[in-house]
Amino acid sequence: MRLLHTMLRVGDMDKSIAFYTEVLGMTLLRRKDYPDGQFTLAFVGYGDEAHNSVIELTYNWGVDSYELGTGYGHIALEVEDVYKACEDIRARGGKITREPGPMKHGSSILAFVEDPDGYKIELLSPHRKD
């Protein structure tokens, strides 16, 4: 078994694809409309689906926002340099919601960014200690 994808419901497919590709540097792997079901799926990631886990963005036609609820946590991305990644994301229009630095009760360097729908994305150094 292997993890295939994580699905997020989005309120504006084009805005979400732009965020994940232009701000976070993922690639749009595929996108398809399902007129009978009135939804669109797009898959984004850092590599092909045969070898990597990806994110499935789901747009239900006519629904422009969702409540995130209290059960959702975050998606975590490993980045070489958390500080530099935040600079780059901010320069591309991304919203940093937790500035880079050591975690509160540990030493791992992390930061958080928010996508257009409010989903939290954690940026982590590859040299985690916690």
Image: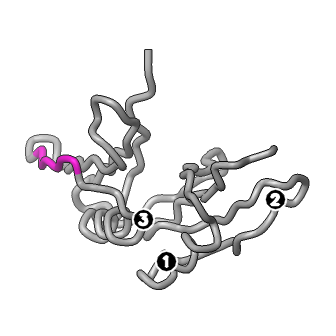
Per the rendered image, the range of residues in magenta is: 29-34
Residue 126 is one of the magenta-drawn residues? no
Asked if residue 96 lies left or right of residue 48, the reply is: right
> For the residue marked with disc 3, what is the amino acid?
Leu
| Image vertical order of residue 80 relative to residue 86, above or below | above
Q: Nearer the viewer, mark 1 or mark 3?
A: 1
Separation of marks 2 and 3 at Cα, in angstroms: 21 Å
Q: CA distance from mark 1 to mark 3?
A: 9 Å
Amino acid beneath label 2: Met
The residue at 55%/49% (across/down) is 75
The answer to whether residue 7 is left or right of residue 109 is left
Disc 3 crowd, CA 10 A, few/some/many (<14, 14-19, 20+) = many
Tell me: residue 114, above or below residue 125: below
**Closer to the eye: label 1 or 2:** 1
Give 34 or 1, whichever is nearer the viewer: 1
Dot placed on the residue nearer the N-terminal end, 2 or 3: 3
Which residue ends up furthest to the top in the rendered image?
Answer: 1
Pinpoint residue 100: horizontal percent, then vertical percent: 70, 71
Q: CA distance from mark 1 to mark 2?
A: 21 Å
Disc 1 target residue: 88
Residue at image location 43% in from the left, 40% down from the top = 6
> Disc 2 on helix, strand or loop?
loop
Q: Main secondary structure of the magenta part?
A: strand
The residue where tag 3 is placed is 24
Question: Pointer 1: residues within 10 angstroms few (<14), some, or many (20+)?
Answer: some
State the residue at coordinates (63%, 49%).
126
Quadrant location, the C terminus? top right
Q: Describe residue 53's horizontal placement relative to residue 42 as left or right.
A: right
Is disc 3 placed on a helix, strand or loop?
A: loop
The residue carrying mark 2 is 103
